[in-house]
Amino acid sequence: MAVGPLSAILAACGGGEKGGGGGSPTAGSTGPGITAAQIQNASGTVKVLGWEWYKVPESNPPGLTVKWGYLSANEDTITKTQQPGTFDLLTIFQGEIDQLLAVDRIVPIDVTLIPNFTAMNSMFQNTDVIRRDGQVYAVPFQWGYAYVTYDSRQTSAPTSLDDLMSPSLKKKIGVPDDPYAVITTFAKLTGFDNANRLTPDQFQQVLNTMHAFKPQLRTIYTYGEAPQLLGRQDIAIAFPEFGPTVLDATKAGADAHMQLLAAWSYVDCLMIVKSTANLAGDYGWINQAIGEQSEAAVSANGLAFPVVDAAVTALPKSLQYTTPTDILNEAPLQPGPPIDSSQGFVPFQDWLSAWNDYKS
């Protein structure tokens, strides 16, 4: 499909994802032990660990000093919070919740103390992916979806796994060095809609698909490299990709387009570190960060999508949409892989091992 307004690109999708079964936004039964007045008057320092492109001054409430540390990988949320007091808040995708809970690193959030929570799209308020055992552990912040980017100078739009397996695309496809993103996408391509909850047999089927696909691969690249690879015609297709890749590939010289094949979505969230030294400041910063002005500034800076619909106009015209409903229906949010096999699903550690074997 040609690059154009997503409302037009997705008009044929129809339908809409229902909000998760979380009901009204609630957090833990005991609450955090602070008041709205304490949050409103919070001062001191809040230390945030997150992606660099999410740092904008509009997120900072008056009276608070905000210090950032930057992520280079999702797993940094585990290693960089080992020392208590190092960070107070995290910005990371919803699939990391179980990993962080397993090491007792994050706490429930009482969203009734966050006035701006109710201003975000109700789909994000109610989704199950931010909840565990009925408690909210993550406040949606920015979201996005995985898509196939293709260069129409070299290939037509792929609409199936068979298209991607075409002999004409041998050594013409690249994928990012991201086990979660790639395996989730191949799970969808293999036919598993519940792409993060795979039984051992299903997981093996996904790996079989990936190994059959290997002759198509030219490279496994680092995020950010796909636009230049497409522009130079080193590859004809890159997937999964996110955010502005299709725009950047066009700037690099490709006739770049996007396709929602095997698409899925993520939502980067704000989570409170258990060892925080400024809980009132954490709540104050979260509330400001998900306000319309901050959401617009963050989206303009990083080109991820806001959870507040009114802020979507901060995006380039070609990335704007009317509502996320159609996109999330076509590319549903995923809960993230489990941390163990107690429910009969393959844990994320096995995903990592399989990915390392795949790259070798």
Image (cartoon, grey):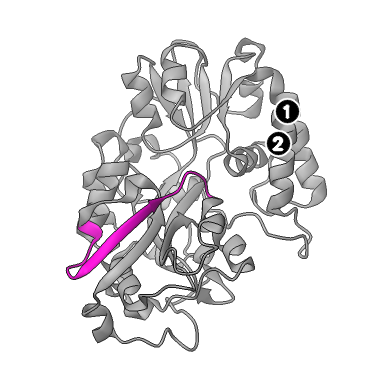
300 is higher (above) or lower (below) than 240: below
- Where is residue 98? Give x, y as percent: 61, 63
At label 2, which amino acid type do we have?
Asn
Number of marks drawn: 2
Q: Is residue 268 above or below residue 239?
A: below
Residue drawn at x 78%, y 52% is 199
Residue type for callout 1: Ser
- Density class for disc 1 (Cα within 10 Å; few <14, some 14-19, many ≥20) is few
Between residue 281 and residue 319, name the one nearer to us.
281
Front residue of 91/312: it is: 91
- Image quarter in which the N terminus is found: top left
Left or right of residue 308, residue 222 in this image = right
Q: Residue furthest right?
A: 201
At x 28%, y 75%, the residue is: 115
Label 2 residue SS: helix
Residue highlighted by disc 2? 356
Front-most of residues 64 and 358: 64
Residue sitting farthest toward the left: 62
Task: Give the quarter of the figure containing the C terminus.
Answer: top right
Disc 1, disc 2: CB below 8 Å?
Answer: yes
Kindly state the secondary structure of the residue where label 1 is placed.
loop
Which residues make up the magenta segment?
A: 58-74
Q: Which residue is mark 1?
A: 360
C-alpha span from label 1 to label 2: 6 Å
Instruction: Name the spot of residue 321 as percent of width and height, x first.
Output: 31, 44
- Image point (66%, 24%), residue name: 162
